[in-house]
Amino acid sequence: MSMLQQQVAIVTGATSGIGRVIALALAKEGARIFVVSNEPQKIPETLAEIRQLSPESEAREVDVTSAAAVEEAIKAVQERYGRIDILVNNAGITQDNLLLRMGEEHWDRVMEVNLKSVYRLTRLVLRPMMKARYGRIVNISSVVALTGNPGQANYSASKAALLGFTKSVALEVASRQITANCVAPGFIETAMTAKLSPEVKQAMLSRIPLGTMGKPEDVAAAVLFLVSEAGRYVTGETLHVNGGMYMS
Ligand code: NAD
């Protein structure tokens, strides 16, 4: 039997990059995926691909910065499946600038998408998970949460905040057999990193002991471990997937 047979997994930002590959990896193990995405044009193709692996999967256009939209989406998952086993908070953005030039709107937007949405979604899934006495929450942080990065004060602050948030939640719900962990990717080949200049990319590569950029599949493998039976005794942790760029 597949590892996640019959389980229900919500994955945010699942129509691009890392989120899409995480959704496919969980679907391959039999989980029914509820895709949360603010890219309506990409939903049909992504959902079709996921359904080839897990036919009962669904998708919905949701902006994770909208409390009402998020609440409706979680309600829809419960009505459709009657359970929520896994939440992967993957949606994230960058709005880079040196701090001196970083306007409040760029600070607020990054915090809203990368941090507040995680508070919002996690809170809503906890009730059904606590009732079921089972749950797996994985938050996608970043290596820059630990190292910092010039031009990313907002982004690295949002990703570092996830680490503290995750540990606190892990402590609050451990007695109900719910785990909460972070995965902190390093430099991964996606649209987010494609927009970097060749010089910046070269500089990043020179800091990676394993010598190459990571792939979304490397991040998905870490998520799969944490949500599967193999990861059942791991909680409040951060799993670094960065080619040695940062070692904790
Ligand atoms: P990406 O830009 O390819 O994907 C991000 C996804 O988030 C997209 O599907 C986007 O539509 C979605 N999203 C953004 N704002 C949203 C909103 N308001 N509502 C709903 N969805 C929204 O980027 P990626 O590289 O795949 O990044 C995925 C996650 O991994 C992010 O949290 C990112 O911070 C993190 N990360 C990426 C890297 C990397 O090198 N690519 C490194 C460390 C961490």
Image (spheres, rainbow, N blue to C red):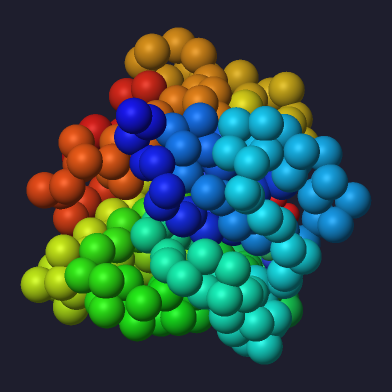
Q: Residue 77 location, x and y as percent?
A: 57, 69
Q: Residue 176 location, x and y as percent?
A: 15, 72
Question: Which quadrant is home to the N terminus?
Answer: top left
Answer yes or no: is residue 23 visible. Answer: yes
Answer yes or no: is residue 104 visible. Answer: no
Question: Which quadrant is home to the C terminus?
Answer: top left
Q: Residue 61 location, x and y as percent?
A: 77, 65
Task: Classify residue 51 by image quadrant.
Answer: top right
Q: Residue furthest bottom?
A: 68
Identify whether 88 is placed above or below 230: below
- Indicate left or right for 230 with 45 as reference: left
Q: Residue 123 location, x and y as percent?
A: 41, 81
Seen at 47% across and 71% down, the residue is 82
- Indicate left or right for 234 with 115 as reference: left
Seen at 46% across and 55% down, the residue is 8
Seen at 38% across and 13% down, the residue is 210
